[in-house]
Image (cartoon, helix red, strand yellow):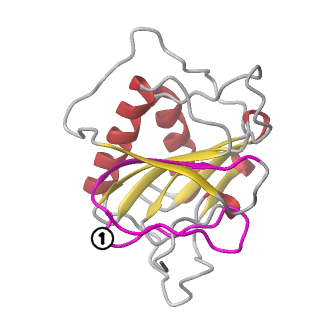
């Protein structure tokens, strides 16, 4: 598996090109700005729909159109101006992450979960970093992802790079390229080992 490394930026990482398709959860150490506690790989299928017996969906999403960010520019890749995604791989990544959400109990505190297929990815970021075991755990669901995708399509266009930040829940859903900036500051995975 590819070497993962944090950068000096707060929660900054970059996804290695050689990372195999799948779902990954990255957990940061409590109280540290750059320490990774764990990276977990999940082999989740994209060609079936898994559904939880009890839904954790909370709809409608408590957001406005201004909470959608169209990812038109990438801070690290100035020469990349392509904001379209490959819709087939993007749909597979969305389905993989949706399956993970339906199977998983919750997203860890101060963590990111993403599904990658070829160069496309869907992700969820949990900004709750209080690490108080008694506080509310962050859930995700396929229905929440579909509602987020509708809002992103409406503001940014179908199959465009975008993310939706749900401030009151300290959660972000998004879709992008493997190389793209995501999660407003959790810039993802570094090739430097």
Left or right of 160? Residue 107 is right
x, y (%) of residue 63? 72, 37
Left or right of 58? Residue 161 is left
**Total number of numbered discs in the rendering:** 1
x, y (%) of residue 173? 57, 45
Depth check: give the residue in front, 41 or 35. Answer: 35
Depth check: give the residue in front, 153 or 35. Answer: 35
Residue wearing tag 1:
18
**Residue at horizontal 25 percent and vertical 54 percent from the top:** 88
**Residue 9 lies within the magenta run:** yes
Q: Among all residues in the image, which is located at the extreme top? A: 53
Q: Which residues are magenta?
A: 1-30
**Residue at horizontal 58 percent and vertical 27 percent from the top:** 139
Q: Quadrant of residue 133?
A: top right
Left or right of 99? Residue 167 is right
* 8, above or below 101, in the image: below
**Residue at horizontal 30 percent and vertical 24 percent from the top:** 50
Q: Quadrant of residue 162?
A: bottom right
Report the magenta stretch's main SS.
loop
Query: 10 Å neighbourhood of mark 1: few (<14), some, or many (≥20)?
Result: few
* 84, above or below 90, in the image: below
**Residue at horizontal 40 percent and vertical 40 percent from the top:** 97
x, y (%) of residue 19? 33, 64
Depth check: give the residue in front, 153 or 8. Answer: 8
**Residue 79 lies within the magenta run:** no
Secondary structure at numbered mark 1: loop
x, y (%) of residue 172? 63, 45
Q: Among all residues in the image, which is located at the extreme bottom? A: 79
Give the quarter of the figure containing the N terminus. bottom left
Q: Among all residues in the image, which is located at the extreme left? A: 47
């Amino acid at each position: 598996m590819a070497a993962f490394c944090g950068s000096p930026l707060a929660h900054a990482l970059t996804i290695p090109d050689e990372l195999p398709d799948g779902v990954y959860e990255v957990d940061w150490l409590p109280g540290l700005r750059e320490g990774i506690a764990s990276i977990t790989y999940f082999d989740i299928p994209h060609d079936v729909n898994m559904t939880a017996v009890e839904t954790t969906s909370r709809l409608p999403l408590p957001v406005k159109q201004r909470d959608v960010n169209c990812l038109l520019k990438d801070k690290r890749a100035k020469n990349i101006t392509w904001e379209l995604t490959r819709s087939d791989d993007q749909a597979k990544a969305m389905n993989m992450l949706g399956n993970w959400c339906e199977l998983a109990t919750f997203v860890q505190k101060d963590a990111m979960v993403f599904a990658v297929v070829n160069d496309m990815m869907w992700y969820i970021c949990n900004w709750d970093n209080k690490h108080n075991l008694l506080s509310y755990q962050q859930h995700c669901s396929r229905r929440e992802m579909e509602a987020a995708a509708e809002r992103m399509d409406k503001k940014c266009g179908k199959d465009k790079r975008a993310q939706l930040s749900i401030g009151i829940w300290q959660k972000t859903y998004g879709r992008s390229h493997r190389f793209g900036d995501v999660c407003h500051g959790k810039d993802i995975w570094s090739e430097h080992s």
